[in-house]
Each structure stands twice: as C-alpha cells, then as structure tokens.
Amino acid sequence: MLKLQTKERILLHLADYDGSQFNDVKNEFPFILTQQGIADALESSLERVSTNLKLLEKEGLVKKKKEYSRKTGRFRNFYFLTSQGNISSDEIKKRLNEEWIHVRDLTDELKEMQIDEVIHYLKKMPKSETTGATYELKEATLPEINYTNIVKHMSNGVLDLRIFVEPKFLNLDKHAWSLIRDAYYDPKHRYVVLTKNRNWQAGALWLKKGIRSTFVAEFRYKAGGGTGGDGFVFMFYKKKNYWPCDGGNLGFVPGITPVPGYGIEFDGLPNPDYNDPPYPHVALIQGHVNNHLKHVREPKVNDFKWHEVKVAVEKSKIAVYLDRKKILKWNGPIDRSYDGLGFAGSTGGLDNWHIIDDVKVTKLTRTKSTKHQKHPKN
C-alpha cells in the first residue's frame, strides 16, 4: 500500500510544492525545489534523486531552471513539473486515492480514510498550542499537509495524525542548551547522550536560561544496553555551578557535597550508601541523591526502550507521568532559590546508555495554568 517509485515520489513532491508562485522578483524559489531539498524532503540519497531527476527530464515530465539565490550567493538549479508532469502527478494522486489507508486520530481511534479526505480533515484541525514561553532541546516544526508527507509518514500501514498537529523536533538548539563533561549530541540520531555504556562516565545537559516559574517539562528517554548502572535525573530549581560526579551520584552532585535543587531520579542500580529505595525506581530527590522525598518502583527505568515523560511543577505540587500514566505525585513547599534546569546521568563500575530526546519545557504564565495543560489521564 502506498508504495511508490522514487520517480513517482519526486513528481508528487514537485506537485505539492509548486514553484510557480515564487516566480517573481520579490520571492525566490524555495530550497525544497533543489536537488538537495528534494532529497531531504523524501529522506532519500542525493545520488538517487539526481539520477531520477535526469530520467524525468528525458521523459519530458520535469524541467530545471538555473536561478540566483540571495541566501547562498550563487546560482543553483531548481526543478518544476512540465504540463505533462502535472498530468502524471494527477494520475498518481488519483491512483493513491483509490486506496483506503489506516489512520490513527488524536483519540487513538483507528479509522479508514482516503488521502484527499485525510488532507481535508487535517487542514480543518487546530494545531497544538501551549501557554507561556517554551524552550526546546530541538526546534519544533510540523510537516506540511500534502501527499508527499502523508506517504512518507506511513508506518507499518498506519498514518498517525498527531504527526501533523503536534510539534516534532529536529535540530539541537545549541544557543539554548549546554553540554557538560561526557554528554554529547549525536547528529546521526538527533538526540543527546548523557553517558555511553562505558564505566565511570558522567554527563549533564543544562538549559542556559534559568527557570524559577512553574512549568511543564516533556521528554523521551532510553536507558540500558549495558551492565546495569547507574541512572539519570531530570533537574530543576537547581544550582548548577558544579562538575557532575560519576557513579551513584547520577551527575546530580559533585560528590558527597549536596547541591541545592530538585530532581526526578531514574535509578537502575541500588546504592545502600545513598539510602536507595527498592530498584529500579523513579524518585523525587532534593539536594542529594540520598534524599528521596517520594519514590515508586518502576521497571521501565532501564529496559533500553523509549519512554515518554511529563513533569508538571506547580506552586506546591509536583506530578510525574510515564508513558501517559501518572506514577508519582508530591505536595509540599518548593524552594525556588535557584533556576537551573537540565539533565544528568552517570555510570560507575557498571554502565548503561542514558539518552535524552524530544525535550520541551513550557513556562507557565500563572501558577494554576497547568489546569489548562492536557495532562494524561491517570
């Protein structure tokens, strides 16, 4: 279903991104109509796209035009459909619309729809909105609603509509975040590695701009794939002028000395010296990894699978959701003396990968504005 050759995908792409509207003095042709732009959009190799564009030119379906680009300061080739190319792309759309596709809507219900129906439905649907200022580990973007992206985002025969209405994340914003010690950004997979599965590592990822207000933080993590140690922590209202220590410290402190601030601890290894509760566990900690304000046993901590986390911090309440289920809730006075927010992880004599992805932190403009956030159901 929806299996297309590269030539057909290129024709659909050029039909979706018609360059005729840019053919004037004020508007340049968009990068998405260049060879590299097409390759990026189709997630294909430049060599394959170049070869197929030449074939389409010989068949009279595509034409190229060399234009000067003010952004690059040089001439480059842009590609457009010929009249016959438009006829061919319409035929492909007609053939695709003869098929029914499985669609998962925002309520997680599975439906059968045709592509034209999906496009009409999505264009009427409001996009996700958040209140307050948002700081993202990755730059949020939404794919355009067209044939190219619908075909591209089909997975195992199902199209998830949330792809088009909930922000996805693509590039590390190095201006907003800093990486400390062993932490690094993996450009191939587009995520941050706090530690590899190597002994005695520690890494931290800090938001450069401080946050003392209430907020909602969302992220994905994957931990495991090693010999079992140690864990990682999401930190907030934290003093951050310290060097993260490895071993059972999880990078939350420089050693035996406490550092003011809070953390949501994902601990996969017991350390009796740190007053650890049963493991693996998720816990709210303060000042040091041995100070657990509340904890819950959780086997998903280091199963080396991707999991979604949401942390809602209100005026005097903290809630943690794991894979859309509330697993921890705590009420009490919260010290906001410091404004550090970030992640840290560590390994010791035992090790694991600790990987963070798709981070979004939303400052709430009012202390009760979390009521307007769409928290997962218990």
Image (cartoon, helix red, strand yellow):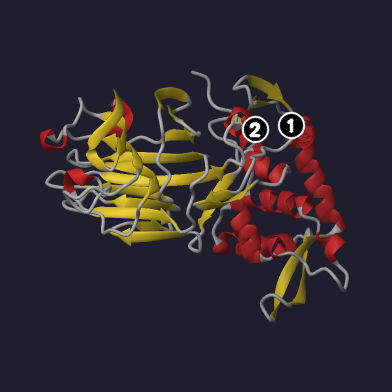
Compare residues 309 and 23 and report the one nearer the observer.
309
On screen, residue 160 above or below 204:
above
User: Can I make out residue 6 in this image?
Assistant: yes
Compare residues 373 and 109 and report the one nearer the observer.
373
Compare residues 195 and 209 and report the one nearer the observer.
209
**Residue drawn at 52 percent across, 44 percent down:** 213
Task: Identify the element where label 1 is drawn.
Answer: helix
Between label 2 and label 1, give the one nearer the viewer: 2
The amino acid type of the residue labelled 1 equals: Val
**Residue drawn at 43 percent across, 39 percent down:** 220
Q: Which residue is mark 1?
A: 118
What is the quadrant of residue 353 in the picture?
Answer: top left
**Residue drawn at 18 percent across, 51 percent down:** 255
**Residue drawn at 40 percent across, 41 percent down:** 335
Asked if the residue at tag 1 contacts the one at tag 2, i.e. Cβ–Cβ closer than 8 Å, the answer is: yes
Image quadrant in which the N terminus is located: top right
Q: CA distance from mark 2 to mark 1?
A: 9 Å
User: How far across and how far down the image is residue 96, in percent?
Assistant: 73, 35
Local crowd size for mark 2, using a 10 Å CA cut-off: few (<14), some (14–19), many (≥20): some
On screen, residue 369 above or below 143:
above
User: How far across and how far down the image is residue 258, in percent?
Assistant: 23, 47
User: Can I make out residue 303 in this image?
Assistant: no
Residue 161 is tagged as 2
| 69 relative to 340 in the view: left or right | right
Residue 146 is tagged as none
Task: Identify the element where label 2 is drawn.
Answer: loop
| 110 relative to 303 in the view: left or right | right
The amino acid type of the residue labelled 2 equals: Leu
